[in-house]
Amino acid sequence: MAGLTSISTVTNKESQRGRRPGKPDTRAVILAVARRRFLEDGYHAVTLRSIAAEADVDLALLSYYFGSKKGLFGAALALRANPAEVLARLLNEGDPGTLPERVLRQVIAVWDAPESGPALLTLLRSTAQDAAVAALVHEALEREIVDRIAERVGGRTGRQRAASFTAVLAGLITTRYLLRLEPMASMSSDDVVRLLSPQLRQALGMPVRRSPAASRPESRRTP
């Protein structure tokens, strides 16, 4: 992924200052500044206003290009699908009672997709090779995923449950996409949801749904 090969480098051209509204290189300049600032200062400390000031563009232009800080972070790391934005959408849409199943299906869809999966895999590999990238991803996941889930779960153990939920998803991603461990790597999305949704439900303190086959009396099962 070209965006990550130079993740910690800002070229001379990208570092040039001056108002750039509407110029073709404006977006590239913003992304270069954002990459450097995220890596140097961490996710939480960086603001859209500070990036706009350093790139010498209007703050409204960042909102126009990227929508939010989460969107800028995903674009800066060359992610076609930003996990934080995907989770935010899932939390705000759909039946809360089906959140674990919907999250699993979306994770599989995003990682399986040829336009988004390779970039995510490259980022995952980069966390093992570059301490700065690992620290940045850690902070972003903590604040934009664990914290958001903990807010939704609530209670004294909300953060523990959110971390457990995230750990199950991390295990899925590692075994299916990084290690390519069989049979997980070739399972259908339906099988993954069937096997892992009970763990996600348990992590969130939700009732575990039994499959129809598991709920049938033994005498009714086909030999």
Image: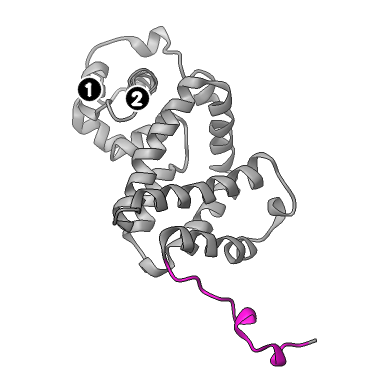
Quadrant placement of the C terminus:
bottom right
- Using the rendered image of the protein, determine whether residue 115 is visible from the camera's viewpoint: no
Q: Along the line of sight, which residue is nearer the eye, 16 or 135? A: 135
Q: What residue type is labelled 2?
A: Gly
**Residue linked to disc 1:** 50
How was this image coloured? one colour
Q: Along the line of sight, which residue is nearer the eye, 20 or 201? A: 201
Badge 1 density bin: few <14, some 14–19, many ≥20, Cα 10 Å: some
Residue 218 position, x and y percent, is: 69, 88
Q: Is residue 217 above or below residue 122?
A: below
Which of the labelled discs sits on residue 64, or is there none? none
Q: Nearer the viewer, mark 2 or mark 1?
A: 2
Residue 64 position, x and y percent, is: 26, 37
Q: Residue at x 37, y 33 (%)?
A: 73
Label pair 2/1, CB-CB below 8 angstroms: no
Q: What element carries label 2?
A: loop
- Using the rendered image of the protein, determine whether residue 74 is visible from the camera's viewpoint: yes
Q: Earlier in the sequence, mark 2 or mark 1?
A: 2
Q: Residue at x 47, y 50 (%)?
A: 164
Residue 135, quarter of picture: top left
Q: What element carries label 1?
A: helix
Q: Residue at x 53, y 28 (%)?
A: 127
**Residue linked to disc 2:** 42
View extreme (right): residue = 223
Q: Give the range drawn in magenta.
A: 206-222
